[in-house]
Amino acid sequence: MSAQLRSPLRASSGPTTTLRAVPDQLGQSAVRAALQQDYATHLRASNNKHGRPYQEKTVTAYCKAVRALDQWMTAEGVEEDFLSLDTAMLNRFFRWYFNGHDQGGTNTLQRNLRTFCSYLDAEYDIPNPYRDKKLQRYAPPSGAKPKTLSHDFIGELLKVTGNGHPRVRDFEKVRDHAIIRVLTEGLRAEELLTLRLDYLHLEQGLLQVVPLKDARAAGEGRIIPLQPKTVVALTRYLRAREAHKLSAGEWLWLGSRNRGRLTYSGLYRMLGRRAKDCGYGSVSPHQFRHTFTDDLLSAGVSGEDVMTVAGWKDRTMLKRYAADMATSRAVKAVKSQGDRY
């Protein structure tokens, strides 16, 4: 019997729901599948509201929402295709989803499905339920707190990947250690995965992050100051990378066993594997960004400086990312003053 995995977080995750199994209705299932494929093609050939192509990660999220709707329709025995979608049906779907997930997850699903309903409206002249006041809205949960990773967890991750020891020669360990170090610098997963060799300025202890959204020129972007140990980890990874058969390419992160550039799914699996090696449960790359925010604020870095390094223009994002450990930081700050009278 395997040992129970520890949680790297300070709060438990929300509940999940499994669809009940029902016989597949091949006719309508095939029709809905074909329309989903057309929708994905439409997204990849379209621009977002900023006039720029949808990122593949966004396309995946939007299509995942449609698949969830399709699976629910099959499970509920709905015989119609997507062209029968109306406000009443969506309200039933969202209510079912909400009963098995948290409010934030339902809000995300509802936002991701909006584009599909707009697509049906434009392409098939189907009334858009999102214009109907009777559609039940699921707002983001007020006071929702992101989850900050513990210092012990990150320390054990670094240790299990070699702890930056110069004698470690295993490519995968050296790479994974460098990736974890870079994640602690507050990069988004997509920003990390799209790093190129010429984005590194290790002699100055910096790297450049090209903006993923609303980018106007490839040369634009923010500068990330690196911790000294991150610089060392990247330097050692670059040496190990030279033996890779694709080392002449521009992408920084390469796959193990001489495979191509690292993908998001590969990054997610790597973190899950390393967390399990330490005896912890699952973790997502984005949780390092929450932890980065708490680390800087706890160290006394100003909110404005945190926003600059993190790439935020709105203080709302700073408040959201800092909410998890706000009470802890406040207590420590007050106690550090000692006796005031």
Image (tube, rainbow, N blue to C red):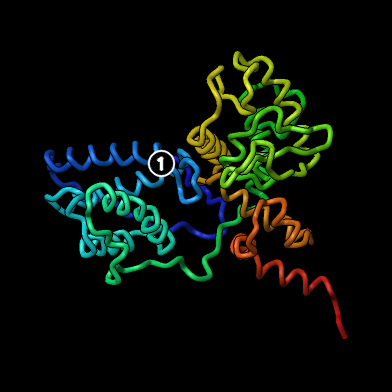
Q: Amino acid at mark 1?
A: Ser
**Element type at mark 1:** loop
Residue 333 is left or right of residue 245, and the answer is right
Is 224 left or right of 267, judged from the image as shown?
A: right
300 or 54: nearer the viewer: 54
Horizontal and vertical percent position of residue 73: 20, 51
| Rendered position, 340 above or below 327 | below
Residue 89 image position (x, y, % from top left): 21, 60
Is 101 drawn above or below residue 241 in the view shown?
A: below
Asked whether 308 or 267 is in front, the reply is 308
* Residue situated in front as seen by the camera: 180 or 93: 93
Q: Position of residue 20 (x, y in %)?
A: 21, 50
Q: In the rendered image of this protein, does residue 129 appear above or below residue 40?
A: below
For the point 38% across and 60% down, which residue is it? 106
Q: Which residue is mark 1?
A: 46
Is 2 on the left or on the right of 297, as rendered?
A: left
Q: Residue furthest right?
A: 341
Residue 335 in view here:
yes
Q: How many marks?
A: 1
- 167 relative to 92, above or below: above
Quadrant (top left, top right, bottom left, bottom right) of the N terminus: top left
Nearest the camera: 257 or 9?
257
Looking at the image, which residue is at 77% across and 62% down?
302
* Residue 157 visible in the current orientation: no
Q: Is residue 297 left or right of residue 313?
A: right
Residue found 30% across the figure and 71% down from its top: 133
Which of the 4 image quarters holds residue 187?
Answer: top right
Circle 1 residues within 10 Å: few <14, some 14–19, many ≥20: few
Q: Quadrant of the C terminus?
A: bottom right
Residue at 40% in and 57% down: 111
Where is residue 240 shown, x and y percent of the image? 69, 20
